[in-house]
Amino acid sequence: MDNYHITKSDKLWTLVKEGAQRASKTAATKAEITTIAADFLKDKTASLKIHKEDATIQEERTFPSAALTLGNQRVE
């Protein structure tokens, strides 16, 4: 499972894969980057940690969120 983080960087909100040097996606607002991240991660098995402006974790989401994955089969 890949781990991603949404954090505030200077003036932009960024989606960064844990261990990466560069952002996968950027947006002007937290709401916008959260929507972009959900779309970006919808077909991946991943954990998303959404941080507050002070860098503390506000929320954690897992993907895929609507289904349980067993082996290569999705059970809904």
Image (cartoon, rainbow, N blue to C red):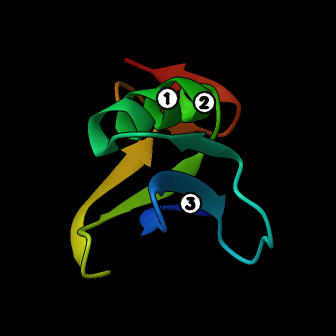
Q: How far apart are marks 3 and 1 (CA)?
A: 13 Å
Can you identify the residue that label 2 sits on? 40
Q: Distance between the residues labelled 1 and 2?
A: 6 Å
* Residue at x-position 43% and y-position 38%: 33
* Residue at x-position 50% and y-position 37%: 37
* Residue at x-position 56% and y-position 52%: 15
Q: Do the residues labelled 1 and 2 touch (CB within 8 Å)?
A: yes
Q: Which amino acid does label 1 sit on?
A: Ile
Residue 52: percent from left, percent from top? 23, 69
Tag shown at residue 4:
3
Q: Which residue lies furthest to the right in this view?
A: 21
Q: Which amino acid does label 2 sit on?
A: Phe
In the rendered view, does 74 fall on the left or right side of 68?
Answer: right
Q: Nearer the viewer, mark 3 or mark 1?
A: 1
Q: Quadrant of the N terminus?
A: bottom right
**Label 2 packing within 10 angstroms: few (<14), some (14-19), many (20+):** few
Can you identify the residue that label 1 sits on? 36
